Amino acid sequence: MNLAVITGNLGRDPELRYAPSGSAVASISVATNERWTDKDGEKQEHTEWHRVVCWRKLAENVAEYLHKGSKVLVKGKLRTRSWEDSNGVQRYVTEIIANNVEFLDRNGGSKAPPPGEEDDGYAPSDVPDDDIPF
């Protein structure tokens, strides 16, 4: 089973684009933190950055309601894709293709986000990987 679940904070505002088919695509960068005490009693911390891709209505909701610093819970699947850069070097990126994003911030008086929407997480079949706009 390919299932990724993370809770963290956005490191930047969501980037919303539209695929050639017209489908909304949003990318977010989510930081997760791990804290522990090492064998010498020193506090340690590690931050891991995750690239998350949202499609269709979920993408539009993410772009409308989230901003840098927002706390989220993301559920989705890991997907690795590759491409050749302008120098002919093969590049790889692993992303979480979100099918659910829960908005965990509750700001008093602000417009409340809709509940996380389930989505199949797949890009529309008419959008080849090299047409993904980021």
Image: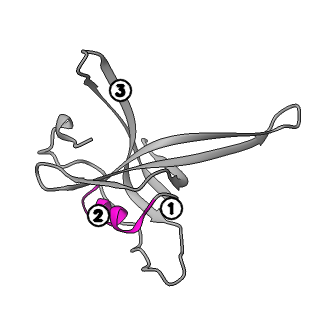
Amino acid type at mark 2: Glu
Question: CA gap, disc 2 to disc 1?
Answer: 16 Å
Amino acid type at mark 1: Ser
Residue 93 as seen in the image, left or right of residue 123: right
Mark 2 secondary-structure assignment: helix
Query: Quick one: label 3, few (<14), some, or many (20+) residues within 10 Å?
Result: few
Identify the residue at the far top of this view: 88
Q: Which residue is mark 2?
A: 60
Residue 80: image location, x then y, percent = 35, 33
Please give the range of residues in magenta: 55-67
Query: Quick one: label 1, few (<14), some, or many (20+) residues within 10 Å?
Result: some
Q: Quadrant of the C terminus?
A: top left
Residue 26: image location, x then y, percent = 31, 53
Q: Is residue 60 shown in magenta? A: yes
Amino acid type at mark 3: Tyr
> Residue at the location (15% across, 45% down)?
125
Tell me the tag on residue 27: none
Q: Which residue is mark 3?
A: 92
